[in-house]
Structures are given as structure tokens and as C-alpha cells.
Image (cartoon, rainbow, N blue to C red):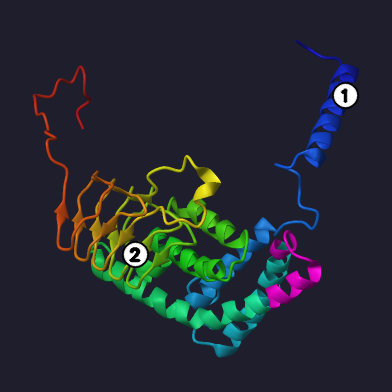
Amino acid sequence: MVYSEDSLSARIREAAREINLFSQSSKVISYPQNGLPDRSKIISVTEQLRSVMFPGYFDTPSSEHNEYAAGYKLTRIADELGAQMYSALCASNDPGVAKEKSRSAIESFIKRLPEVQKLLATDVEALFNGDPAAQSVVDVIFSYPGLNAITVYRLAHELYILNMPLIPRMMTEYAHSQTGIDINAGAKIGSYFFIDHGTGVVIGETTEIGDYVKLYQGVTLGALSTRKGQLLTGIKRHPTLGNRVTVYSGASILGGDTVIGDDCLIGSNAFVTASVPANTRVSMSGLELSFRQNNPGIWENG
């Protein structure tokens, strides 16, 4: 049907009025009175933090090993992130309380950054040592999506443990959109963490991971069921992996009571919902490959 300009304008006015009224009255989608953090500024701060963790790699090389350049960046980050923290906290706090909490939180966060950098150095080492295709640690830092996702996770995790609303999720979802790797900021992950290739990796909020753990693409560390929804908040619903565990592509390990012991190897496409003792190899069985002569009429020759 073709509408006249007057008819279309009337429909636009009617739709706009109804949308506006519902948006104001709905408890589900009404916009917070004191506003929300700015998504573009959170992304900017995330990238600035990454450049501080790896000086010279993601900004001008002159900043490498330059204390004053790092101090300037951290001052700018403190100002910008502190303002976004204030906005996030205003949604559920009095403005005066939000101001004090954001000031305390940004100080605590900045204080933790040297330790985050040391942890990230172990991740770089794990990625380089674990991937024969890596040409150098520079290659890992500059190019690997796994390290990108881990970097943002480690930064967001510090905000998560400070009980900062909204911002940790915004940061990790930005990394998710860039890398295809979804790590919830609440997960607890030890040192020397390795994610190879990474596309499709999912790590849930209450996951616990030890040191020297390797994950390959398509791995899910998830919950058995979320049917109870918000009733599960605060309950451990994702698995625990011990030290030196390797999980190959496509494997799913589910459930808060599921514990994978130290030095286990979980094979590709395994579906694990029960605990596995240390030094165990888990693999799929009963699957067979079928081989027959290629028929060009059905399959194209490679």
C-alpha cells in the first residue's frame, strides 16, 4: 500500500507518541533518570588501557618505556573512566554517594594495573610457547585475538571485583564483538592462560580456571541450565578447571559442581557434565569416519 505524505506523517506522529508513552511508563525499558555510561567512551578507555599494558604496541612508539607518557595516559584514563563510573553508579545511588564510590573505585583500579600487567606477561608467554605458528612475542601481542580478549577480561575483572555495575560487561562485550571470544568479567582465571584461535569460546561468570590452562576454539565453559533465571544470581553454575588442563575445540564443560582435576585433557567435541579426576584424558568414543570414492557429481573436487 502506498501512503500519501500526510497519511505517513500522521502514522509517524501516532507511533512516536505511543512509543514515547510506553518508554516512560515501562519498568523494563524506561531509561534511567540519571543516565548511563557512554559506550563510545568505554571503548576508548578500553583501548587506552590496552596501550598502557603494552607500551608502544597500540599507540605512538615514543611512549615505550616512558614513565611520563604512561603517567599522562593514566591521568587521562582516571578522568574519563572515573566519569563513566560515576554515571554507572548513579543509576542505583544518590549522586553524592556515587561520586565518593567512583573516586574510591578508580583509585583501587589504578593501583591494581601493575599486577594486571604482570599477569598479562604470563599470558603472552603461554601463548607464544604454546603455539608453534607464533613467530615472536611481538606477533602474539600485536595480532592474537586470544590475547586481546584476555587483556580486556583481566582489566574488566578488576572492575567486577570492585562491584562496578555495567562497565565490566560493556568492556568484555566490546572484546567479544572484536574477537568472537566471550569471557564474563566475573570468571576467575589464573596465570599463563592460553586461548588459541579462540572463535566461539564462551567462559561463564562463575567459572574458575587454574594456572597454565589451554583452551581452543569453540570451547564452552557454561551452565547446565538457566531456567531459574535471576534466582541463580550469585550461585556457582559454571565449572572449575584445575592447573595445566587442556580443552580442545568444540568441547563443552557444564555445571557449577563440575570440577576438572589438574593435568586433564578434554578432547574435541566432548560433552562433560560431571567431575573428572586429575590426570585423566576424556575423549569421544563410538564415532566413525566413513570413506568412499569421491563422486564429482555430488562433491566438488578440492
Please name the residue that numbered disc 2 is placed on.
209
Q: Position of residue 4 (x, y in %)?
A: 86, 15
Residue 128's disc is: none
Give whichever of 247, 161 is nearer the camera: 161
Q: Which quadrant of the structure image shows residue 106?
A: bottom right
Q: Residues within 10 Å of mark 1 (few under 14, many from 20)?
A: few
Residue 87 highlighted magenta (yes or no): no
Number of numbered markers: 2
Can I make out residue 55 in this image?
yes
Residue 9's disc is: 1
Label 1 secondary element: helix
Q: Position of residue 135 (x, y in %)?
A: 28, 68
Circles 1, 2 touching at the beta carbon (< 8 Å): no
Residue visible at 47% across and 57% down?
184
Judge left or right: residue 232 versus residue 285: right
Q: Which quadrant of the structure image shows residue 26?
A: top right
Mark 2 residue type: Ile
Mark 1 residue type: Ser
Q: Which quadrant of the structure image shows residue 258?
A: bottom left
Q: Foreground mark, 1 or 2?
A: 2
Give whichever of 18, 224 is nearer the camera: 224
Q: Which span of residues is magenta-colored?
A: 88-103
